[in-house]
Image (cartoon, rainbow, N blue to C red):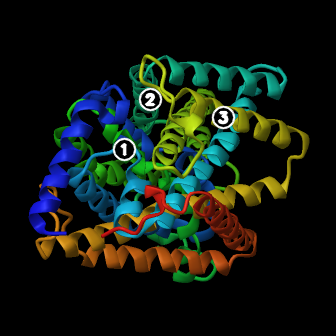
């Protein structure tokens, strides 16, 4: 295929995408996209998971978040380069299909769908658990109500989804900014019960900066939970087909990643660990709750519980949104049941969203009946599934950039810094995280599950290909 033919094909795809968004309504504005991007980086991994990380690595957890955050920025810029080359709703699987092959698109679409189904199961169950803080109501009832409400909101219109995500993200952002300001006031003015002991020297006085039991190795072992905290930051890529002005809005949203991570993760942890010594934090207890209690602000526990509830509902809302779009992309490419292609008059994928929501409800029931370690292993597998999307993004950016530099494809107006080398570095970093997971008995089971899922995908793909060997979905890319 010549460069002229490729340019014409790209222009045709771009015109079609811009005109119809693959049948979707371009109803997400700049305000909503920005908040979806911000909210995607803030979740229960920070509000709850950071407590365990602090107990393992001490203050050096700050460095783990900063290092992982830098890699996340490289991943998002790689995604941005691809999005500006061709903004599509099924971004990850579409790029995998184009730059790696049809099976990669198939595997990526179904794996990302699985990631959000499992994440939705855990988050809606967590939300139901948080409700018991205020009212003694059955957990299944809260889970049912939340799932039905979010399901209905996702079917009404993508604009309503965007509005819900905007306000969910606003609550999370406000809570973290408020915590940072309170901690800054304590450090400078000395008010509250923690005022007499608060000091930035807590970051290095209590056993040193690398105060974990095994020093810097303990810091490395927290990378798996740190990366889990950043999962869903790539969701902004799924909104490409429904953004009003993707070529303007998406780059702006992606370029806010560094300051988001600097403020909401690094900044918040520096402040909290300066006010409260790291030795007072325990696994399973939110560092935000512990900090409020140390300050003598008892109402803080109720506030944080509301924020964590919001974070869980935000994640479930995102899951409902992304699963329907991913199933429709697979169906449009002949790699999923045709029934998933159906859209409502408001431009939402009815059948795909309904199917995914139904599975989320089954998962809630299973978790209610058989809570325990088995379910936690499924959550670990969700981490592997989510990181697969990052791996695919990086590989696709490398292959795209090499083709674009050779003149085989048009150049993206939003190039990732460092060419392909930052993507290569990010792949190596993710590889290191997988190695640390293999060294942890509690997370190793997730690595055992990955080959099983891969085998299921491989067999399913071969069956589909045997039934339709001449189909475009299974043709090799030029």
| Front one among 96 and 133 | 96
Does any portion of residue 431 appear in the rendered image? Answer: yes
Image position of 57 with respect to 73: above or below: below
Image x and y of residue 331, in percent? 52, 44
What is the number of the mark on residue 236? 1
Marks 2 and 1, how far apart at CA:
12 Å
Q: Residues within 10 Å of mark 3 (few under 14, many from 20)?
A: some
In this picture, residue 133 sits left or right of residue 218 = right
Residue annotated with mark 3: 355
Q: Residues within 10 Å of mark 2 (few under 14, many from 20)?
A: many
Task: Determine whether the residue tagged by mark 1 lies in a helix, strand or loop.
Answer: helix
| Marked residue nearer the N-terminal end (3 or 2) | 2
Image x and y of residue 117, in percent? 64, 44
* Count of number-bearing discs: 3
In this picture, residue 145 sits left or right of residue 192 = right
What is the number of the mark on residue 165? 2
């Amino acid at each position: 295929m010549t460069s002229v033919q490729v340019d014409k094909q790209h222009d045709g795809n771009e015109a079609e995408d811009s005109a119809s968004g693959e049948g979707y309504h371009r109803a997400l504005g700049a305000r909503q996209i920005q908040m979806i991007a911000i909210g995607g980086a803030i979740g229960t991994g920070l509000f709850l998971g950071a407590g365990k990380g602090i107990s393992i690595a001490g203050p050096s957890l700050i460095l783990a978040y900063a290092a992982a955050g830098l890699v996340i920025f490289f991943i998002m810029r790689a995604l941005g380069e691809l999005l500006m080359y061709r903004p599509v709703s099924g971004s990850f699987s579409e790029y995998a299909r184009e730059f790696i092959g049809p099976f990669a698109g198939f595997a990526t679409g179904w794996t990302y769908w699985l990631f959000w189904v499992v994440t939705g199961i855990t988050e809606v169950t967590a939300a139901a658990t948080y409700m018991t803080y205020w009212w003694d109501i059955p957990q299944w009832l809260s889970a049912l109500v939340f799932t039905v409400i979010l399901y209905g909101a996702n079917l009404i219109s993508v604009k309503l989804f965007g509005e819900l995500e905007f306000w969910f993200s606003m609550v999370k952002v406000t809570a973290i900014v408020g915590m940072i300001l309170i901690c800054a006031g304590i450090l400078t003015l000395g008010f509250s019960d923690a005022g007499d002991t608060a000091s930035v020297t807590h970051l290095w006085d209590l056993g040193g900066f690398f105060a974990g039991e095994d020093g810097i190795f303990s810091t490395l072992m927290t990378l798996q939970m740190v990366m889990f905290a950043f999962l869903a930051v790539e969701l902004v890529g799924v909104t490409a087909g429904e953004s009003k002005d993707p070529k303007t809005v998406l780059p702006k949203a992606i370029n806010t990643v560094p300051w988001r991570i600097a403020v909401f993760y690094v900044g918040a942890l520096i402040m909290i660990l300066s006010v409260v010594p790291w030795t007072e934090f325990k696994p399973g207890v939110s560092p935000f709750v512990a900090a409020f209690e140390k300050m003598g602000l008892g109402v803080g526990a109720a506030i944080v519980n509301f924020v964590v509830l919001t974070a869980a509902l935000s994640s479930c809302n995102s899951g409902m949104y992304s699963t329907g779009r991913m199933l429709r992309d697979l169906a449009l490419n002949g790699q999923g049941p045709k029934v998933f292609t159906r859209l409502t008059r408001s431009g939402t994928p009815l059948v795909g969203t309904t199917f995914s929501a139904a599975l989320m409800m089954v998962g809630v029931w299973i978790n209610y009946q058989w809570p325990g370690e088995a379910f936690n292993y499924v959550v670990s597998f969700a981490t592997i599934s989510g990181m697969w999307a990052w791996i695919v993004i990086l590989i696709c950016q490398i292959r795209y950039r090499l083709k674009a530099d050779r003149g085989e494809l048009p150049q993206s107006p939003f190039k990732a810094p460092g060419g392909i080398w930052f993507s290569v570095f990010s792949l190596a970093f993710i590889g290191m995280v997988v190695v640390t997971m293999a060294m942890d008995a509690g997370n190793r089971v997730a690595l055992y599950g990955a080959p099983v899922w891969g085998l299921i995908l491989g067999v399913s793909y071969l069956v589909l290909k045997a039934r339709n060997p001449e189909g475009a979905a299974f043709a090799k890319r030029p």
